[in-house]
Amino acid sequence: MAVVEVNLSGGKEHANQPWVWRLCREFNVTVSIKKASVDTDFGWMTLELQGADEDIQRATAWLMTTGLHVEAMTRALGA
């Protein structure tokens, strides 16, 4: 199992979308919200994604297609 921490941020057009719900539903990853601040004009969050390397790569690649700013912060491989 891999663990990846990512920062997401987006403007008004992204702030009201269910990004975390879609990650949990559409990709085989466990999502933990580490930090977040979301209002009607701007939002950001730090998420920890845990799962198989391939699933995390697919989830991250999808996030990059949404128009959100996506930045991988850390990566650690589990046992």
Image (cartoon, helix red, strand yellow):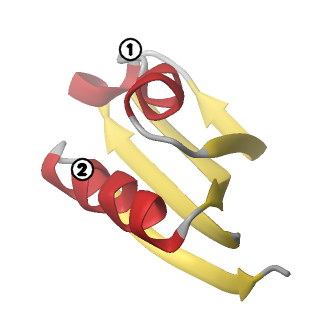
Q: Amino acid at mark 1?
A: Asn
Q: In what quadrant of the picture does the C terminus appear?
A: bottom right
Q: Amino acid at mark 2?
A: Trp
Q: Is residue 56 above or below residue 18?
A: below
Viewer-proximal residue among 73 and 28: 28
* Figure quadrant of residue 37: top right
SS state under label 1:
loop
Q: Report which residue position mark 2 lands on.
A: 62
Q: Residue at x 42, y 49 (%)?
A: 9
The 10 Å Cα crowd at callout 1, few under 14, some 14 to 19, many 20 or more, is: some
Instruction: List x then y, in percent, for residue 69.
Output: 31, 59
Viewer-proximal residue among 36 and 21: 21
Q: Report which residue position mark 1 lands on.
A: 16
Q: In what quadrant of the picture does the N terminus appear?
A: bottom right
Tag 2–tag 1 contact (CB < 8 Å): no
Q: Residue at x 65, y 54 (%)?
A: 46
Viewer-proximal residue among 62 and 44: 62
Instruction: List x then y, in percent, for residue 31.
Output: 67, 41
Judge depth for marks 2 and 1 and give the one in front: 2
SS state under label 2:
helix
